[in-house]
Amino acid sequence: MTIDFAPEPEYQAKLDWAARFVREEVEPLDRWIMDARGAPGSAPDIVFEGPPAEKRAFDKQVKALQDQVKANGMWALHLSKDLGGLGYGQVKLALLNEILGRSGMAPTVFGNRAPDSGNAELIAHNGTQAQKDRWLKPLLNGEFRSCYSMTEPHAGSDPGEFKTRAWREGDGWVLDGEKWFSSYADQSELLIVMAITSPDAPLAQRASMFLVPRHTPGVEIVRNVGMMHQKFGGGEHGYVRYNKVKLPEDALLGKEGSGFLGAQTRLSGGRVHHAMRTVGVCTQALEMICERALSRTTKGELLADKQMVQDMIADSYIQLKQFRLHVLYAAWLIDRDKAYTREVRTEIAAVKVAAPKVLQDIVYRAIHLHGSLGVSNETRLAQMWVAVPTMGIHDGPSEVHKVTIARQVLRGHKASPDLFPTYHLPKEIAAARAKFADLIERQVLEEA
Ligand SMILES: Cc1cc2nc3c(=O)[nH]c(=O)nc-3n(C[C@H](O)[C@H](O)[C@H](O)COP(=O)(O)OP(=O)(O)OC[C@H]3O[C@@H](n4cnc5c(N)ncnc54)[C@H](O)[C@@H]3O)c2cc1C
């Protein structure tokens, strides 16, 4: 079995192009967003809030860049060919996402922004031909935004607590309940909503997913919830109420009762993509550490020559290297198994848990090393830092993923057959004595 993460020269050339393009064309869009909203360096979001004419100019520029990405064969790389994408696979996507992780706008420009990327995967896997024709193609073309509406105000990581219901009525469905943190709900054409359809069924078959056009009567955006660094009243995460929303029969996505299974597919993809982009963020933070350490002197010596600073650089390098290889390994497993097998899900859970820790450690060191500049709003470090707690929560908190990992690890082990462990030294010594008894006896006889 060969594990090789090096791309062919043709794909490497595409990556080199993407790296240059992101630095020279896409990262300036992030700065433009920051400048327009008057909050330099403090917002990781990708919504333009400037004057209308400037917003139109911004949108035009985004579209022009998207066209260049399409022309270079780098658009919507997250989907395989049979699902409507370009089919380069997850390792190649990981290498691209490391580059895109540097910029908030890059996933939009490259056609794989969340939550659209995961939503497209869901429709591609579970949709009927008619659903794909209506929603998938325009979604893949970046023609509109979509929203994934699963978390509820009282329950996020435990689907057993969900209360939003859907039931059959006439020749369609009625959807009723509340959802929370439905990102970009108010800007989306399509909401994919998880609802309990068989409350008495076993948990795995209890829920179904529905394709809900945003402007369907009864869909109410109660308010947008902002993140901790945003001003009150702003933000992109919809608190949504579905007031007995009437839906046609064909609003059901996938089989009735397959909602939670479908969510696994959707969230598994999203989780590993977040981890891939986190490699890019951490790489950028380490670059900043190194530039600063090589630029600043104190007590007549460069920071880079101080052993405690070298300790920071070495620890950051080791953590990033280990994390990156783990993410690439998870991507390689997905390419190998072509499914979210138990092994794949374990590695995805592992990188999902590792991501916030590595991000926190490296970005904190970068902030600390930059001193007052580090804690100011004049570098990208603020943007990186506010993403740390989010990383440990969205797409399921770390605790839940650790349970997945621990269960899988334990699967390969057995309890000791008696009171003392199998590795108890007195037991092992007795076993070794028994094993060599004949040998010892022969030697003793020979020497007698
Ligand atoms: C930026 C962002 C964007 C999001 N976008 C979306 C979206 O588009 N659509 C959507 O549906 N949701 C979205 N979410 C919601 C996200 O998926 C949930 O926040 C997440 O699943 C956790 O649910 P919760 O917030 O209800 O926290 P809870 O489930 O209440 O968990 C809170 C804490 O309780 C503890 N905990 C929970 N479960 C366990 C356990 N089994 N064992 C031990 N401790 C535990 C952990 O410390 C955990 O952090 C988004 C969240 C964020 C932060």
Image (cartoon, rainbow, N blue to C red):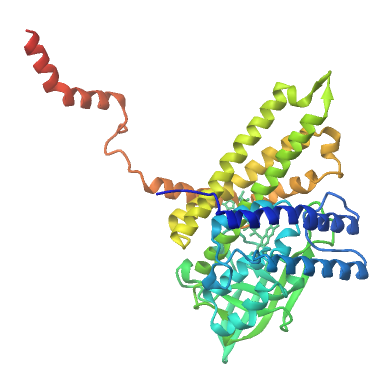
Left-right relation of 446 to 395: left
| Number of numbered discs overlaid on the protein picture | 0
* Residue at 71% from the left image edge and 73% from the top image edge: 241
- Depicted 251 relative to depicted 154: above or below: below
Q: Examine the rendering and report whether any part of residue 396 can be seen.
A: no
Q: Which residue is at the front of the view, 337 or 428?
A: 337
Q: Which residue is at the front of the view, 427 or 374?
A: 374
Task: In the displayed orientation, state which residue is furthest to the top.
Answer: 448
Q: Quadrant of the C terminus?
A: top left
* Residue at 45% from the left image edge and 68% from the top image edge: 202
Left-right relation of 206 to 11: left
Quarter of the picture for ligand 1? bottom right
Q: Which residue is at the front of the view, 322 or 349?
A: 322
- Depicted 299 relative to depicted 7: above or below: above
* Residue at 70% from the left image edge and 72% from the top image edge: 142
Q: Residue 92, image x and y in percent? A: 57, 56
Q: Which residue is at the front of the view, 30 or 150?
A: 30
Q: Examine the rendering and report whether any part of residue 269 can be seen.
A: yes
Left-right relation of 437 to 26: left
Q: Quadrant of residue 211?
A: bottom right
- Depicted 288 relative to depicted 69: above or below: above
Q: Residue 5, image x and y in percent? A: 53, 49
- Depicted 105 relative to depicted 82: above or below: above
Q: Residue 292, image x and y in percent? A: 79, 33
Q: Residue 186, image x and y in percent? A: 76, 72
Task: In the displayed orientation, state which residue is furthest to the front.
Answer: 9
